[in-house]
Amino acid sequence: MSGEAVAFAAERRWAIVVGVIIASLVAIMVITGLHWAAMPPSRVETIDPRTLHVSGEFVEGNLGTSVSADGKVVVRLIAQQYSFQPQCLLVPAGVPVTFRGTSTDVIHGFIIAGTNANVMLVPGFVATFTTTFRKTGEIAMPCHEYCGTGHEGMWARVQVIAADEFRARAGRGERLSCVRR
Ligand code: CUA
């Protein structure tokens, strides 16, 4: 074979390799797109971000930690440029805690260091998850989704206290938080 023919064969081989890669990427896009359209996630809770402050679950007086009649611990919070409301979340150790959160403006998110809590807060949707805090103490809870110029300064704290102490405080019936006034 002449040098030219060898080069041509090599080019053809590589053209086929590239073609296969492109074809598989297109196939992945089509399959995931069809799958998403056919089977949307089972539980999507939506909420109107424009009326969050005015009515419904996320009004100011309803934010923080509450204990429902059946003993379930629920933390409600909202994220907005550039803070979380409330700034400090009070939770018991060793008990499942359900978080419910949303955003009033852009996409935020948070992680709670040392736990499996890692969630995105998307305006228009309620994010929810349940986790159990193993030990007492204070944990940082930074926003982990770039949300604008104030992103680095956006964080809250989680105060984990003993379950007995928590129950005693929850007995008074008010929304619990650990915001220092
Ligand atoms: Cu909120 Cu980054």
Image (cartoon, grey):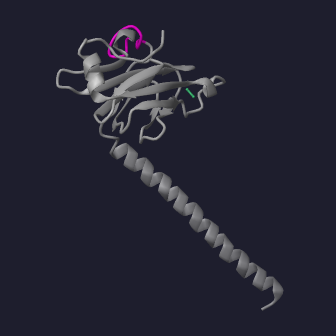
Which residue is situated farthest in the left direction here?
Answer: 70
Image spot of residue 59 (x, y percent) = 37, 11
Which residue is situated farthest in the bottom direction here?
Answer: 1
Nearer-the-camera pick, 3 or 119: 119
Nearer-the-camera pick, 158 or 58: 158
Overall secondary structure of the magenta section: loop
Question: Residue 12 occupies which quadrant of the picture?
Answer: bottom right
Q: Is residue 44 above or below residue 21?
A: above
Residue plotted at (58% across, 64% down): 21
Q: Is residue 6 above or below residue 140?
A: below
Where is ligand 1, by quadrant?
top right
Bounds of the magenta span? 51-59
Q: Is residue 142 visible?
A: yes
Question: Which part of the image, by quadrant, shows the N terminus?
Answer: bottom right
| Residue 2 belongs to magenta span | no
Residue plotted at (46% across, 35% down): 112
Nearer-the-camera pick, 137 or 72: 137
Image spot of residue 167 (x, y percent) = 25, 22
